[in-house]
Amino acid sequence: MTDMAARASPASAGPASAASAGDGTDEANRPVAVVEKRWLGITVEGWQKILAPIAIGVIVLGLWEFVVRQAGIAHYILPGPLLIFRTLITDWGTLSGSLWITLQITGLALLAAVIVGGMLSIVFTQSKWLELSLFPYAIILQVTPIVAIAPLIIIWVNDTLLSLLICAWIVAFFPILSNTILGLNSADHNLVNLFQLYGASRWQTLIYLRLPAALPYFLGGLRISGGLALIGAVVAEFVAGSGGTASGLAFRILEAGYQLKIPRMFAALVMVSMSGIAIFLVLSLISHLLLRRWHESAMRREN
Amino acid sequence: MTARASRTTPAIVARGAAGRPVVQLRGVGKRYSNGTLAVAGVDLDLRAGEFASLLGPSGCGKSTVLRMIAGLGEPSAGRIDWPTARHDWRDQPVRDVGFVFQEPTLMPWATALQNVMLPLRLEKVALRDATDRATAALNAVGLGAFLSAYPRELSGGMKMRVSIARALVTEPRILLLDEPFAALDEITRHKLNDDLLALWAKAGFTVLFVTHSVFESVYLSQRIVVMAARPGRIIADVAIDAPFPRDAAFRTSVAYAEACKVVSARLAEAIGA
């Protein structure tokens, strides 16, 4: 007993020990970022990720060009990649105008989807009754094929651009709605308790807790909706088959099909695909920038 | 330095015992909507400045009692009074509690400082004032160098410190802890126990500490309230008279061993009951 008492340091339970915090809080035990070798700012693994798909692409395109040349396939049946690329450059004037229109519709539809989907999900999570009574209709809107209702919308809405916008919006808004609702309801229950404990208002709980907790879910929905908005815009335009100056890429594809300008058709198709990839990359980048400090999805595994 | 036997009515022994209790539970019971009777007939007075533990097997309703004191869920029977609390404009007593959950329960998107500032921001304290007070609270738990760290950049023990700083930043009259260190390793747990005692000695708030560890409750408390399950009820109220400050030497003292023996016996009754 006596030697044990002598061994114990007299200061160990004083207030000073609370300030020093020796356990696990010292420099040595903090998580450290591993420094990796980089080339042009990209890690070895990063280069693998970039180069592997590019290699596959080059091989496939090479094979395609080879087969088309060897078998002498007519360009109005299947043009080679080089011809498509050349058409992309020669027809850039018309195609870029159409691309701009399609991107405008896509962007505006996505914006409307974010605003309406975001607002509705907040309203739904604030009022159980509104959610119960309105959510089924949101699902109906989602499961009805857009090709089937696009003609109606085009008849009802006089302005072609506006009708395309509505079609693209219908396709795009549901993932944002359902994901954001899931996110708003996914706040840590103990954190909800904590907010209740400090007498937080509904508004404070929404701003400080539910919205930040929903952000990763919302961004997940946004990435899906970005692609869907483009698909919606293209599909609606196919149905509308509108001519004139204000025509998007889908109309160029239809037009090129009628005129058997297959290389041009492929060029427009390439542009649609590239736009989809670009939208996905931009939204992924936004998501990464917003989540990189705290969310698991934006973190590297440290082992 | 002896552990006193159990009593049904708590006698006044602790320091700062003069005056009315901070919180008073009378015949408190809780029946959940599915019919389960979690807690029945709990009478408990917490005196100003005392360090009390609520000890019992899992499922004995000790967390339920703690949550009802915090105002998370109303009792279905009995009443909880705050004799010395001020009252708000609706004439409701202002509980003025700090709560530490079993998990750190931090907002992952916010830095340590922002997390600790939260209770102040919710009370609409001005940003500058809130920043100063939260910084001071983090300094007090030894995390002054980690103000801008995000929770995922902190170890388990450090996250718990942030959680304690958040509970104390409002300078509550009573600190409620729900098995706060159960998930931590023993070394970290001992360190946090000592730091909690130091903070308590300095600030003089009342503590109610829920735990299922006899050793932890004896080391920390002036008083241990033992609960039994089905339905949750108090079966013993043991005073631990060892002086403060307590340190590692106390863990190896005869008084500690004696107290552990007495409390273990009560806990065994609780499990057998």
Image: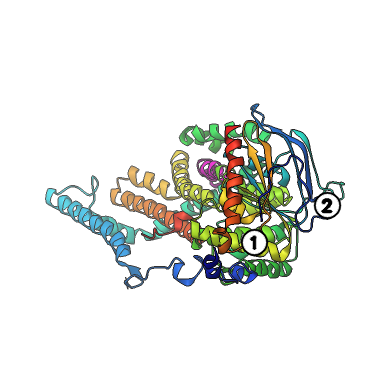
> Does the stretch in magenta take in B169?
no
What residue appears at the point 33 percent right and 53 percent down from the top-left corner? A267
Instruction: Give the position of the N terminus of chain B as an image quadrant.
Output: bottom right
Q: Can you say whether A20 is above or below B21 in the image?
A: below
Q: Residues within 10 Å of mark 1 (few under 14, many from 20)?
A: many
Q: Secondary structure at mark 2?
A: loop
**Left or right, A106 with reference to B144:** left
Q: Does residue A215 appear to the left or right of A199 in the view shown?
A: left
Q: Is residue A165 magenta?
A: yes
Of all chains, the one bearing label 1 is: B
Residue wearing tag 1: B197
Q: Nearer the viewer, residue A91 or B215?
A: B215
The answer to whether A118 appears left or right of B173 in the picture is left
Q: The disc numbered 2 marks a residue on which chain? A: B
Image quadrant containing the C terminus of chain B: top right
Residue A120 image position (x, y, % from top left): 63, 43
User: Percent x, y for residue A265?
Assistant: 33, 49
Going 60% across and 36% down the picture, which residue do you hit?
A: B269
Instruction: Give the magenta part as a residue range.
Output: A159-180
The amino acid on which the numbered mark 1 sits, given as a three-letter code, is Leu
The kind of residue tagged 2 is: Ala
Is A24 or B189 nearer to us in this picture? Answer: B189
